Amino acid sequence: MSRSLGIPVKLLHEATGHIVTVELKSRELYRGSMVECEDNWNCQLKNIFFEASDGKVSQLEHVFIRGSKVRFMVILDMLKIAPMFKHLEARIKGKGSALGVGRGRAIAMRARAQAAGRGAPPGRGVVPPVRR
């Protein structure tokens, strides 16, 4: 098992202290300030605006949401400037980073290798003529 956290979990931790919207699998909607969150998406919210699945609206002071019941979370746009994403952008833009290697770069690297004489068909480098 890997010990590193994925980007969604890191973003969840960055959202502590900010306003988030959480929709549960039961279609209930919670919008409030995140007090604390865990790696398994368990979270505590305070000063909540709650909308039930039948449309009734109410105010709650404090709530704990189990992570397995979460359908999705909406996190404010201001978290785009979080330090975590600054570090991630630097890794993607940096050369030699495995994170930025995609299909396009792999194809370009193969083409360069073939042009340099690597990756030719087996034999002594001479391709036999094709009979027609």
Image (cartoon, grey):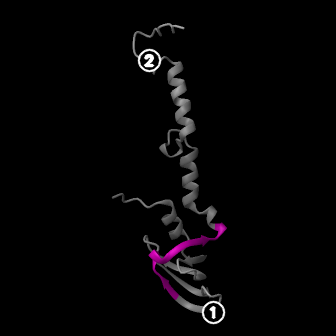
Q: How many callouts does the rendering have? A: 2
Residue in the foreground of this view, choosing between 89 and 131? 131
Residue position marked by numbered label 1 in the rendering? 58
Circle 2 packing at 10 Å, graded few (<14), some (14-19), many (20+), is few
In the figure, 15 relative to 87: above or below? Answer: below
Question: Which residue does the numbered mark 2 point to in the structure image?
Answer: 121
- Residue at image x 51%, y 75%? 70
Magenta-colored span: 63-78
Closer mark to the observer between disc 1 and disc 2:
2
Figure check: 53 above or below 4: below
Crowding at dot 1, Cα within 10 Å, few <14 / some 14-19 / many 20+, comes out as few
Residue 108, image x, y percentages: 56, 31
Task: Quadrant for the N terminus, please.
Answer: bottom left
Q: Where is residue 48 shown, x and y percent of the image?
A: 60, 87
Q: Is residue 126 magenta?
A: no
* Quarter of the image where one finds residue 79: bottom right
Q: Is residue 28 left or right of residue 128?
A: right
Describe the element under mark 2 as helix, strand or loop: loop
Helix, strand or loop for disc 1: strand
| Amino acid identity at mark 1 | Ser
Looking at the picture, tell me which residue is in the foreground, 112 or 84: 112
